[in-house]
Image: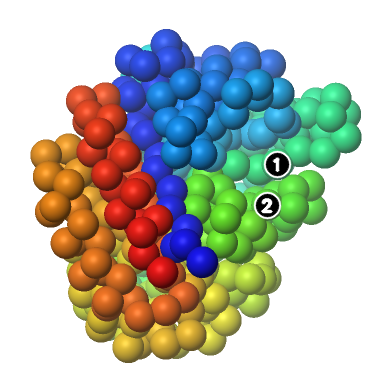
Amino acid sequence: MSVPVDITFHASWWAKHAGIDFSQEFFNDPDYRLQCDVKMRRTLYDRFGHLGLGEKDPRPRPIVGSDLLASGYLYSGILGCEIRYFPDAPPEVICANLSGPEVDSLVGFNIAKSGLWLDTVRQFEYLRNKFGYVDSHINLQGIQNLALDLRGSELLIDYSVVPELAHKLINICTKITVDIGKYLTSVSKVMSHGVTAITRQTMPGVYVTSNCTVEMVSQKIYEDFLLEPDILLSSYFRPFGIHHCGQTMEHVVEGYAKVKNLEFAEVGAGSDVAKVRQALPNTLLNLRYSPVKLKTASADAIARDIAAMAVGAGRLYSISCVGIDSETEDHRIEAFINCVRDLR
C-alpha cells in the first residue's frame, strides 16, 4: 500500500497559475469561493492530473474556508484583530498588542457578539440550505497562536514575569476555541482539512489544533501553560491531533506525549522524526517536507530526504509539502509525489 501524500500551494501559486484572487470576497462570499474552488481543482487536474490530482469536471462543493490553501485568521478576527486581505497571499492578522486591562475585558467574551463570527455562521447556513450539508475547512489556529495575535511578544515575557496574566489570556483563548469548535462539529463532519489537507486521506474527522508557535517556547513553558488547554481540547474533540510545523518538534514532544488522546501529529520539516516517533509510538504522524527545499532540490536529493523521513517514522505515517510557491517548477513537485508513492 502506498504512503499517503499531499501537496498544498501558497496563494501566490494559485494567483499565478489559476488566476484566483484571494481578496476578502474569497472568504466572505460563498458563491464566489465555490467558483474559485471549482477552478482550483480543475487547474490541479490540468497540471497534475496524470498524478491523480484535481478533477477533470469538478462540481461545486459546499465549503467554508478552503482545504487548498493554508490561512489561519478567523479566530483572531473574531476577538478583534484587524485582518488584511491580499489578491495573492493569505489573510494577514495584525497583532492587537493588548494591554493587561484589555485582556481583562475579554473575560467572558461571547462569540455571538462578533460580526465576523455571525457572518461565518451565515455562510454555513446558506450553504447547508443550498446543498443539504456543509464542510468546514476553517483553520483551527491553536491556543498560543491566537494568544500571540492578541498580546504579541509580550506573552513570551508574561510567562516568566506575569504568569497570572498569561494564564488568563490562554484560558480566554481556550474557551473561545472550544465554543467555535462545538459549533463547527455540530454542522460539519470534517474539521481539519483547512489545517492540513492530508487528513482527507488519513483521518477525515480528526480535530487538529495548530501549534505552529510552540516552536518558540520550551517544553517547560508548554507544560506549564499550554498542555492543559490541549488536553481540554482533546476531551471535547475526538479523534484529536496536533499540528507542529516548527523545525524541532522533538524539543517539546515529551509534552505532547502527555496528551493521552493524541491520535494524529504533524511533524514539521527539519524535525528529528525518529525522536518524535519514539515519544509517540502509536500516533499517526504526518511528516512535512520543506517547500523551501523543494524549490531547489534535485530529484535525487528529494528521494534521499524522503527515504530518511520514512526510516525515522517506521510506520503509521503520511507525508505532505505545504506552502509551495509560484516559482517552484512542476517537475520538482512530481518528483516529490513519486518519491513518496514509491515507498511501501
Q: Nearer the viewer, residue 259 or 69?
A: 69
Find residue 24 and report its horizontal and vertical position in percent: 50, 18
Q: Residues within 10 Å of mark 2 (few under 14, many from 20)?
A: many
Residue, disc 1:
135
Q: Residue at x 56, y 61 (%)?
A: 202
User: Which quadrant holds residue 119?
Assistant: top right
Residue 170, placed above or below residue 51: below
Find residue 64 and report its horizontal and vertical position in percent: 64, 34
Which label number is shown at residue 190?
2
Find residue 81 and report its horizontal and vertical position in percent: 43, 36
Which label number is shown at residue 68?
none
Residue 175, placed above or below residue 101: below
Q: Amino acid at mark 2?
A: Val
Label 2 SS:
loop
Q: Nearer the viewer, residue 5 or 335?
A: 335
The answer to whether the residues at label 1 and label 2 have Cβ atoms under 8 Å apart is: yes
Where, quadrant-wise, is the C terminus in this rendering? bottom left
The answer to whether 331 appears left or right of 19 in the picture is left
Find residue 32 and report its horizontal and vertical position in percent: 62, 14
Residue 193, placed above or below residue 251: above
Q: Residue at x 70, y 41 (%)?
A: 135
Residue 71, placed above or below residue 326: below
User: First in sequence: mark 1 or mark 2?
Assistant: 1
Q: Amino acid at mark 1?
A: Asp
State how far apart marks 1 and 2 are (Cα).
6 Å
Answer whether residue 24 is visible to the viewer in this image: yes
Q: Residue at x 48, y 30 (%)?
A: 49
